Image (cartoon, helix red, strand yellow):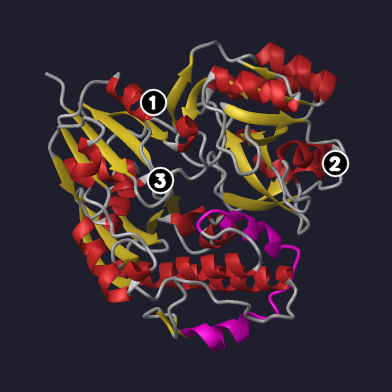
Amino acid sequence: MSRIIWGISALFHDAGLSVIKDDEIVFGAHSERYSGIKHDKHINKKLLREAIRYGHPDHIIWYEDPWKKRLRQIVSTEIFYNKWYPNPKKYLWEFGLRAPVSYTDHHYAHACAGAYTSTFKDATVVVIDAIGEMTTCSTWKYQNNLLEKCYETRYPSSMGLLYSAFTKRVGLKPMDEEYITMGMAAWGNPVYAEIIKRDFIKSYHPFKLKQNVHKGIGNYLPDADPMDIAASIQHICEEFVVDYVSRAIQHTGINNLVYQGGVALNCVANTKLLDICKDIWIMPNPGDCGNSLGAALTHLQKPLVWPGPYIGTNIAYPYPVDACIKELYTNKMVGVASGRAEFGPRALGHRSLLADPRGHDIKDRVNEIKRRQKFRPFAPAILEEHLHEYFDVKTNASPYMQYVGKCKRPYDFPAIVHVDGTSRIQTVGKSDSPGFRKLLEAWYAKTGCPMLLNTSLNIRGKPMVNTREDADQFESEYDIKVVS
């Protein structure tokens, strides 16, 4: 008889659900894509119905310990401006879920999500996020399929919270638009980095803040250019991440890195780690939604075969290579919604808006369609074997858009090059998405260009398209052909 384990993350932000069936990762999805509410913190009934198709759960693992979280609310006086953390078991009972429910530790779930989906026999595991229950950074030693915690940083000292506070300061939404802060940084200069460190950071190791920034930092540096503030906090984040990981590797003596937590979505900081690590694994959903998978893996406590990121809702059509080529060649862009949806915040070819990267007007056109700020960059998806012909980057593969590299021919591909000359790169190898790979091969054969602009099939503030019905609505509202 099959044994089915569910992992669930919810009630904070980016709710998600993952299913492991007989030691196989069979499903993982974001609640927001069913509800239509960006960063939805609640589990959605449509998501539950889809998960149950794989079988009713024998056991459910909740991604953190609610009692520890309540303790933090008391210690930090959060309870005076936030609702009391509810009982997850009662919350799940309201959905009719009667399977036994267990709790795990938030950072341990992050560590398991990374370590047990990696191919490493041993690794240094680092988790950096805003906050778990009380932990904000942690280092683990992974050997013999076991995780041993080495040390941790505790609330309120948090690089994730500090970055979010500065995201709010530059006029963006914290716990949501940190990735835009990262993009803004290239337009500014880190002229305030030393001032920020003086005012907020007591030490890097152990990491200590001089004040609690959980509620924000107000109108700090009121006369400063927001682009310079973004550049400054980005510089500090990169410096801290490199310092923290370097010390973690020195402590464990292991140069393979598993890196998890929301801060691991900062691909500019990630790129700095290529200089100090032998090999790096970042599970492509390293934030709290991906912790649903980590929660399930805390129950098994053993490595499983990573199936790739395409484990969400299935639009069961053959990948529309010919239709995409026709639309790209005629109109320079096309939406594609085909196959299983990506588990993670980045579209990787199955729920993507694709465009010819060579046009000088393409970036502005796509930003206008997606209702994004014009300063924001787009990513290229490139045939893996052509990576080093076009980009200077210290890795041979970047299948999940986790690193940036300098474009060697920026004037030929203006749609995918940021103001600093870099691109956030997705490589597509022969063992990655077969359909998307065939599309890039066909595009290369027709045009001599081995890459396409690839961005998520959504509008700013809205989740990615999930179903064919979503795709039809997107096509109707925004006048972009979406093929399946």
Which amino acid is tagged 1? Lys
Residue at horizontal 40 percent and vertical 78 percent from the top: 207
Residue at horizontal 48 percent and vertical 45 percent from the top: 39
Which amino acid is tagged 2? Asp
Quadrant, the N terminus: top left
Residue at horizontal 83 percent and vertical 22 percent from the top: 331
Query: What residue span does the magenta drawing correspond to?
Result: 175-201
Taking 387 as reference, is 233 above or below it?
A: below
The residue identified by callout 3 is 41
Taking 435 as reference, is 35 above or below it?
A: below
Q: Are marks 3 and 2 in contact (CB under 8 Å)?
A: no
Task: State the separation of the CA atoms marked 3 and 1.
Answer: 14 Å
The quadrant where residue 61 appears: top left
Q: Does label 1 or label 2 sit earlier along the sequence?
A: 1
Q: Residues within 10 Å of mark 2 (few under 14, many from 20)?
A: some
Q: Does label 3 or label 1 sit earlier along the sequence?
A: 3
Asked which secondary structure carries label 2, the reply is: loop
Taking 284 as reference, is 162 above or below it?
A: below
On the image, the x and y values in percent for residue 337 come to: 59, 22
Asked which secondary structure carries label 1, the reply is: helix
Asked which secondary structure carries label 3, the reply is: loop
Q: Is residue 189 magenta?
A: yes
- Count of labels in the image: 3
The residue identified by callout 2 is 412
Q: Is residue 447 left or right of residue 33?
A: right
The residue identified by callout 1 is 46
